[in-house]
Every structure is written in C-alpha cells, then in structure tokens.
Image: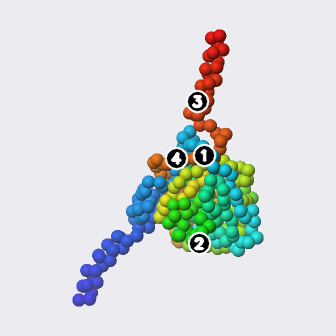
Amino acid sequence: MELLFLVLLSPLTVKAAADGEKEWCYQSQKCALPACAEPRAWKTVNEECGKKYQSPINIVTNKVEYKGDLKPFIFEEYDTTQKSSPWTIENNGHTVKVSLSGSAKIGAGGLQNKYKAMEFHFHWGSNLTEGYSPGSEHSIDGERYAMELHIVHIKESFSTTTEAVKDEEGLAVLGFFINIGAENENYASLIKKLNEIVSKGNKTTMEPLRLDSLIPDEENLKSYYRYRGSLTTPNCNEAVIWTIFKAPITLSESQVKNFCELYFNEHNTLQMTDNFRPVQPLNDRIVYNSDVSVIQAPAKAVLGIPTFIYLMILLFQ
C-alpha cells in the first residue's frame, strides 16, 4: 500500500518541482539546459523582468538630452587600498563577481545621495576562430563593445543590496565599456586569479586594488549618459540609477579571452560565453547626456537659422 502511494505521489512531486522557481540562464546556455529560462523568458522567473523600465538599453546619441546637473562625480577612496581587507573573487555561475571590502563611495554626478561600492562584475562575448564577438550589455547607436564592467553601489543608508532594491533610487551602477587593444597592467593580478575560479562555485581572495586603477582616468569620466533602469539579471529590480561612461577601458585580446575560459557549471562542460542580456525597450524614458559640448542635430539646425538669414540679407543687398 505504501509503495502504491509513493508511485501515485511521484508524478505530483515532479510537477511540483516543475512548477517551482525556474533556473534562469543566458541564451548561450539554452542548448545545454533546455529547461532553463533564457532572457526572453526571465519574466517567468520573476515578474519584475517583464516591467517597463528594464536594462540594458541601446543609447541613440541623437536622441539624448543634455542635463545641466550631471556634473563630474566625486570618487571617495577609489584611490586607496589602505582600509581594505582582501577582496573575494568568485565564479557565481553567471559571471566573475568581485565583492569589495573597503569604503569607496561616489557622490555628485547628479546623484541626490552618496552611494557605497559593494561589488563589480563583468559581461563578455565569445572567442571566435578569427576575432572576438562583442559582449557588452549596453550599446551606443547599435554598436556593442567587447565587454562591459559594472561597479554596483548602494545608497549609503542601506547595509545590503536586498534592502537597496526596495528603493527606486537604491542602487547606482557605473557602467564601463571595454575595448580590445593594448595590454592593461592594472588588470594583471585580477585576470591571473581567473585560473582559480574556473568552475561555478569557485571563489578565492585577492589583494585589493585601487578601484580607480581599473577605470579610465578621472579626467575622462566627465562625459557620460544617465537613465533610470533595472538590474540586468533576475530579479531585474527597477531600482538602478545607471551611468554609462563614454570613455572605454582597454584590455588586450588575450586578457579578454581569459574570461571565456571559465565555465557556467561545476563540471566544466559549458563555457561561460555571451553572458549578456539583450537590450530592452526604452519606452518613455529619456537618456540624459552630461556633455554640454555635444549639441544635438536638431539644436544645431536651429542655431544655424540666424546665420542663414544673415547670409541671405548680405546676398541680396
């Protein structure tokens, strides 16, 4: 009788598991994990992923609007390692995540609060036979970069990201495009650590670096785009003030390819490539531009009208 009960129960147990929380994945994992929810189905994992103001986006440069309060950022303790204990670097099955231990913060830059740095992570593409397929999440006029770095900050009044996502301005994420070019010595120790986190779940520690050594010089961080959006992985909380800097970081091709040698799983059978979410609809959002020297095409046309009239008057005198 007990055996019969278990036999009858088994289909119900399987169904319950199937109805439970789905595992989310990137499109590059779908063939190996047909049951996982790829980006178009993330809203079945969490309904937030189907909301209106999602990230990443494609930034159309002739539609951005200049905003006067987007002044240069103030980077606090980005230039020191003195107060930092070792960082934790891990392969979490989706990306390389580095958890920070210092007291680095950002302020100004059009932000109404100070935000403390919690972690940074990367998104990248594929190592092809010839060249490299782009893997940045955001794009500029449809063009994507090799990689993208996200430095995640939370409002300084919060202790955890879990608290911060409940506030629509709880997180401030700095996004940096990564180009392929010359070797970047500042990334050498971090990339060397990738050999220790090849498989999902692997983690280790590393000596902290100056955060400002991983990003462009501060002088090149005055030009950026700003918009309201979400986290780019489930739960896709719409609690992020996004800043996308125009000046890219440069890594060598071999440095970039090191990221493609990681694996999505514990058994090293599925390489971690193309770990990016496709761009999402902008809907009624406005993307703002910090750079006053960039006059949009319609504005240039308007400014040209007085000149045209003046020339016509001279011509017919």
Q: Residue at x 64, y 13 (%)?
A: 315
Residue 84: in sight, yes or no? yes
Residue for badge 2: 159
Precedes in sequence: disc 1 or disc 2:
1
Precedes in sequence: disc 4 or disc 2:
2
Count residues near mark 1 (Cα–Cα under 10 Å), then give few for <14, some for 14-19, many for 20+. some
Real-space Cα distance between discs 2 and 3?
Answer: 49 Å
Real-space Cα distance between discs 1 and 4?
Answer: 11 Å
- Under mark 3, the amino acid is Val
Q: Residue furthest top?
A: 317
Label at residue 67: 1
- Under mark 2, the amino acid is Ser
Real-space Cα distance between discs 3 and 4?
Answer: 21 Å
Label at residue 286: 4
Precedes in sequence: disc 1 or disc 4:
1
Q: Position of residue 36 (x, y in %)?
A: 42, 64
Q: Describe the element under mark 1 as helix, strand or loop.
A: loop
Quarter of the figure that contains the N terminus: bottom left
- Under mark 4, the amino acid is Ile
Precedes in sequence: disc 3 or disc 1:
1
Residue 131: in sight, yes or no? no
Q: Answer above or below: position of 304 versus 312.
A: below
Q: Describe the element under mark 3 as helix, strand or loop.
A: helix
Count residues near mark 4 (Cα–Cα under 10 Å), then give few for <14, some for 14-19, many for 20+. some
- Under mark 1, the amino acid is Lys
